[in-house]
Amino acid sequence: MSKIKQTCFGALLFLGLVLPAQAQWSSVISGTSNSLRGVFLLDSGVAYAVGDSGTILKSTDSGGTWSALSSGTTQNLYDVYVFSDTEGVAVGDGGVVRRTTDGGTTWSSVSSGVRDGLRSVSFSGANGICGGLSQDIIYSSDSGASWQVAQSGFFGGGFFGAHMLSPTVGFVTGQNSIFQALEGTTVDGGAHWSFHPFYFDGNEGNADDNFFFDNMTGVSSGVLFDGTGAIARTTNGGVDWTSTLFPQGMQGIDFPQSGSGFTVGFFGTILHSTDMGATWSAQSSGTGLDLYDVRFATDALTGLAVGEGGTILRTTNGGEEGGLELISAVSRKGGFDVELPLTGAPGVECRSDGNSGNQKLILTFSDELAAVDNVATSCGSIHRIRIDERDPHTLRISLRGGVCNGQFVTVMASGVHDDQGHTLAQATVTFGLLLGDVNGNGVVDRDDDALVRADHGTITNETNFREDLDTNGLIERIDATILKSKRGSMLPP
């Protein structure tokens, strides 16, 4: 995946295709303005995104929220492969390979054996391949702990996409030194390669990413010489390719299932295929920024796309229009609600309803609900869940969380079904519990105390309800006493 910004050719032509009425991809706060070049998502919900200036971000809630990690390099990173919640490999400029075995806390430097920029990495089990500029290819048989050079030092070109189909069979795509798209195949784990140059319907260009369903059938996304795009498809192992052209350059590609694939490109382009890449339809991304990579969980519903300027997009329904979505969430006590944002900084519930520490969450969905398979929590226990009979758009969750004060709590509903036959694989809400944190800044201090004292003796209303810590409808001495007992407590950073 080359992730090279191209010209604006065709922007207006494609506008009508990529902006239907309702976007099912939502923007997520990444916390960085650096362009993000690669992304990887596990079914566990752990995700990593990498990008310019050594940027590495991690999520543990399927891309809903992100935190920055220290990569140990300032080189641009272009791709990442994640084996498990704790182990992964990132590659980038200057032959950089960074590897983690502790969930991203530390990233060690691994010698790649080359100095050219590395652009793509893929594994099947412990065996993996990595492509780079100057048509470099390196390979590993120990989950990226060490690498050997298959070839390097060619004039021009490079390999921007890689896909390891099995421990022995793998594919790279890119461009040769005379501007033809170029596909390479290995059948011995990356040590030796055979190559097939091709054109995108007679056009020169880069083959920027690839995905193979088996030894014979695969697809490649690309950018043509004029900045427009193409998706090519082969059914004979890369010897011959047929191409479909698009107004925008196409970049990352992923098929979580053979009947559901996605590719992203310039100016917010997202395309979806249900027939192994033979045909494609546009989805609405809600952005006009360039997108460079896409990755889905195996359910083909939860997916992430990353791109220009720190852009992260997320879908939980396969990007389809009219699917089931979680719209909002609140914590309800004493008749007043604390908003719990679904992205960005989590909301903070600062009130108690006595010694029980119970929490009542209200989740609102886009459609009326029919059933929910399961609800789990990271702290405390689920006491009761029910679909509101008066408003079936809402799911009410009673959480016993008396031991969770001073913690972030994630509640996840799995297998949410609406009355139209749609299923949302999971709906996740993360919020902080910190008794006494009236202003919601993550720490109980004199500022919170001042707010409670200023409204002493007043009846709880929509503007001061956070100060009513015991939720009895009146701001009084007991609220000040509760706050005093919690002074100095705080949420984790």
Image: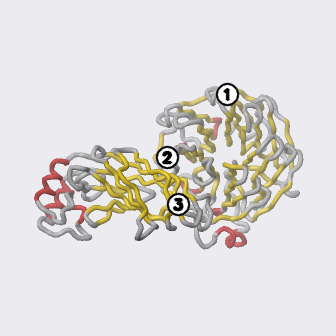
Reading the image, the residue beneath label 3 is 27
Q: Residue 59: which numbered mark, if any?
A: 2
Considering only order in the chain, which callout, 1 or 3, is on the residue closer to the N terminus?
Answer: 3
> Residue at 78% of width from left, 58% of height from top?
230
- Coordinates of residue 99 in the picture (x, y in percent): 57, 33
Reading the image, the residue beneath label 1 is 147
- Rendered view: 493 above or below 329: above
Considering only order in the chain, which callout, 3 or 2, is on the residue closer to the N terminus?
Answer: 3
Amino acid of disc 1: Trp
- For the residue labelled by badge 1, is the local secondary structure a helix, a strand or a loop? loop
Q: CA distance from mark 2 to mark 1?
A: 28 Å
Classify the position of the C terminus by image quarter.
top left
For mark 3, does the 10 Å Cα neighbourhood hold few (<14), some (14 to 19), or many (20 or more) residues? some
Instruction: Count up the numbered dots.
Output: 3
338 relative to 29 in the view: left or right:
left
Nearer to us in this view, 405 or 151: 405
Q: CA distance from mark 3 to mark 1?
A: 36 Å
- Coordinates of residue 398 in the picture (x, y in percent): 35, 55
Nearer to us in this view, 239 or 177: 239
